[in-house]
Image (cartoon, rainbow, N blue to C red):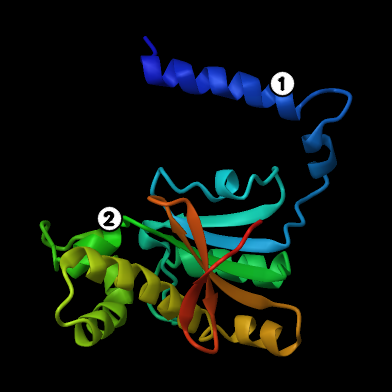
Amino acid sequence: MQSKEIRRLLAGFRRFRTRYFDPDSSIYRRLQGGQTPKTLMIACSDSRVDPAILADASPGEMFVVRNVANLVPPFERGGTYHGVSAAIEFAVVNLRVENIVILGHRQCGGIRSLMQNENPIEGSFVGQWMQIAAPAREKVLRDNEAADEDVLCRQCELESIAISIDNLRTFPFVQLAIEEGRLSLHGAYFDLESGELYEFDHDSRAFNSLQLD
């Protein structure tokens, strides 16, 4: 027997199919020949921060990667599995996206666990993954000695976006695309408490509120 939640999701799929597979104006009919998104969005897996919903994007508009704390690892050739790196390569080299956006958010659980130095499970995948943002934690603790935990987490949420942008530049194909003038990097921060969106300024390495009116 299907659970109530699964039945609700199936009802949502029926509405989706009605909206996007209408025989007179099917979006997916146009997409059957392939995808040509202009933007790679790297966002958090947090269920409250769906980038397609936040951007009111239609199918085919964005190539989306979601992971814990919207992190980008630095470029490396070692190791075995590199899901995020593979997605970045595909977006930049194959799809030739014009923008990469790192989308962070308020109340990020991954960042809070990093700031609290939590590692409840030996060999934790989350704990190891969050080490990508360890430089952000160190900087925030060094620059905000008297701040409370809530402020520290917010500052680390912001700083980790800057770290991920720095890591993007370590990928040779990303750097080449930037030098050729066909790729731009962006950082954004969604405050789910206030509904505000902030944009990363590369020169000042600060975040400024976007005025949408």
- Please state if 90 lies on the left or on the right of 36 as rendered: left
Looking at the picture, tell me which residue is in the foreground, 13 or 208.
208
Question: Foreground mark, 2 or 1?
Answer: 2
Report which quarter residue 134 is drawn in. Answer: bottom left
Q: Position of residue 159 (x, y in %)?
A: 37, 76
Asked where in the image residue 63 lies, by quadrant, the reply is bottom right
Tell me the crowding category of disc 1: few under 14, some 14 to 19, or many 20 or more residues within 10 angstroms, Cα based. Answer: few
Rendered location of residue 1, percent (x, y): 36, 9
**In what element is the residue under mark 2?**
helix
Q: What separation in Å lies between label 2 and label 1 (alpha carbons)? A: 35 Å
Residue at x-position 79% and y-position 36%: 27
Residue 172 in the image: x percent, y percent?
59, 86
Residue 128 visible: no
Question: Residue placed at 71% from the left, 51% from the top?
Answer: 61
* Quarter assignment of residue 171: bottom right
> Residue 55, can we see it?
yes
Camera-side residue of 190 and 12: 190
15 shown above or below 86: above
Check disc 2 and give the amino acid type: Gly
Q: Residue at x 18, y 74 (%)?
A: 147
State the residue in front, 73 or 62: 62
Q: Is residue 1 left or right of residue 137?
A: right
Mark 1: amino acid: Thr
Q: Which mark is residue 109?
A: 2
Q: Please tell me the numbered disc located at residue 156.
A: none
Q: Going by the image, does 49 lie left or right of 153?
A: right
Q: How many marks?
A: 2
Secondary structure of the residue carrying numbered label 1: helix
Report the residue marked by disc 1: 18
Q: Residues within 10 Å of mark 2 (few under 14, many from 20)?
A: some
Compared with residue 32, is residue 189 higher up or lower down, i.e. above or below?
below
